[in-house]
Image (cartoon, grey):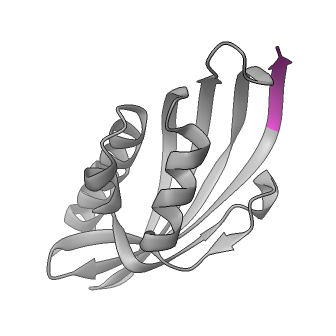
Amino acid sequence: MSDLEAIEKIRRLKARYFRTMDTKQWEELAAVFTDDVVIDMTGEGAGITTSVAAYLPFLIEQIGDVITVHHGHMSEIHVDDADHARGIWAMEDELWWPEGSPLKHLHGYGHYHESYRRTEDGWRISAMTLTRLHRIIEFS
């Protein structure tokens, strides 16, 4: 597989990540990650998880009833070898909490820093860190 083919497959993988998160398709979202994915959300006050089995229940608890819209832009993907790659994605997200929640709306900007590993099922996210540049938060 050429580097360009790998990069395109990784771009499609990340598109699937955003779509399945926003449409709450949890099983499909789990499939974009390796089982041993390391997800660093310390910048969000949530710590680090070291498996998709630990991350998904946390994510569902946090945004299961929240309307979310995520956009990824300007991917910088570097293929290290036939089975490993790294990437940085500029991102923008908006979240709307249900009425009665302490938060009403968040509009954020930042970057996803990721590592990818090619498995027998294709490319998967093996590590992900979210960093934020700016947040606009509206409280209820």
- In this picture, residue 117 sits left or right of residue 121: right
Q: Is 89 placed above or below 66 here?
A: below
Q: Is 132 placed above or below 136 here?
A: below
Q: Where is residue 32 shown, x and y percent of the image? A: 32, 61
Quadrant position of the N terminus in the picture:
bottom left
Q: Please tell me which residue is depicted at 30% across the width and 46% down the height of the picture.
A: 16
Residue 27 seen in render? yes
| Residue 135 is a magenta residue | yes
Q: Please tell me which residue is depicted at 19% across the width and 71% down the height of the picture.
A: 122
| Residue 92 is a magenta residue | no
Q: Where is residue 116 shown, x and y percent of the image? A: 40, 73
- The image quarter containing residue 110 is top right
Q: Please tell me which residue is depicted at 36% across the width and 76% down the height of the picture.
A: 34
Q: Where is residue 98 shown, x and y percent of the image? A: 61, 18
Q: Is 93 placed above or below 27 here?
A: above
Q: Nearer the viewer, residue 132 or 23?
A: 23
Q: Is 111 placed above or below 64 here?
A: below
Q: Please tell me which residue is depicted at 85% across the width and 18% down the height of the picture.
A: 139
Q: How many marks?
A: 0
Q: Which residues are magenta?
A: 134-140
Residue 88 seen in render? no
Q: Where is residue 67 shown, x and y percent of the image? A: 51, 23
**Dominant secondary structure, magenta:** strand
- In this picture, residue 43 sits left or right of residue 75: right
Q: Nearer the viewer, residue 103 or 77?
A: 103
